[in-house]
Image (tube, rainbow, N blue to C red):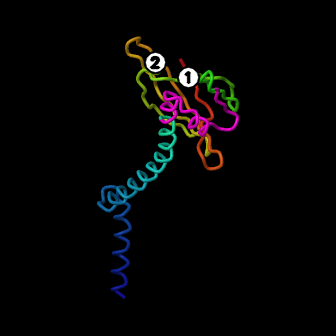
Amino acid sequence: MEAEKAEEANETEEEEAAEEPNDSNEVVEQEEDNTTIEKNEGDDEDKHQEQVDLAYEIFDAQEKQDYDFLESVLSQGSTLDKKTNMFSFENVTYPHEQEFLTAEDIGELEFRYTHKEDEDSIIVGFGAINYETESSFVIDFEFVNENGTWKMNDMDINK
């Protein structure tokens, strides 16, 4: 009987020790939790990295006038005019046309952010900086998931 009381006392002490903020067990638990959080964040970053990489590929394809690639990544309702090197985006709040962007137009390109609109829509933002003219503008891509494939639904410039 005394052995059972001693065992219960040990279990109670262990439970209380796990709840104490300065206990080394909690630090381990926190480290494990942080590792889990980092893995979850890494998964999200990996998902968004696909769209960031796709945006860079679209910049390169515009520079090289790789029409086949550009047409392959356009969403339904978006078109490409090869004669004028211009996109037309219709499935957006404000339908518009957008000329191809070249390295000369952009200057120095800096990745800025991603924003998940919903499960099937991600915004990827870049800053375009021209240090000589001390000017900059933002380029936003909207990617939508069409049948499991990410497609460019919009490329918008905010000057």
Residue 142 at x, y = what percent?
59, 34
Q: Secondary structure at mark 2?
A: strand
- Closer to the camera in the image, 85 or 129: 85
Disc on res. 51: none
Rendered residue at 42%/53% (across/down): 39
Which residue type does callout 2 highlight? Ser
Q: Tell whether position 71 is magenta.
A: yes
Nearer the N terminus, badge 2 or badge 1? Answer: 2
On screen, residue 43 above or below 2: above
Residue on which the image places disc 1: 157
On screen, residue 137 above or below 28: above
- Looking at the image, residue 103 sits to the left or right of residue 92; the answer is left
For the view shown, which residue lies furthest in the bottom direction?
1
On screen, residue 1 above or below 144: below
Residue 115 at x, y = what percent?
54, 37
In this picture, which residue range is highlighted in magenta?
57-81
- Looking at the image, residue 27 sits to the left or right of residue 51; the answer is left
- Closer to the camera in the image, 27 or 97: 97
Rendered residue at 49%/30% (across/down): 59
- Closer to the camera in the image, 91 or 3: 91
Residue 105 at x, y = what percent?
48, 19
Name which quarter of the figure residue 108 lies in. Answer: top left
For the view shown, which residue lies furthest in the top direction?
133
Rendered residue at 56%/22% (across/down): 157
Q: Secondary structure at mark 1?
A: strand
Residue 25 at x, y = what percent?
32, 62
Find the distance from the CA under tag 2 to the CA under tag 1.
11 Å
Which residue type does callout 1 highlight? Ile
Residue on which the image places disc 2: 136
Mark 1 neighbour density, 10 Å: few (under 14) some (14–19) many (20 or more)? some
- Looking at the image, residue 123 sits to the left or right of residue 90; the answer is left
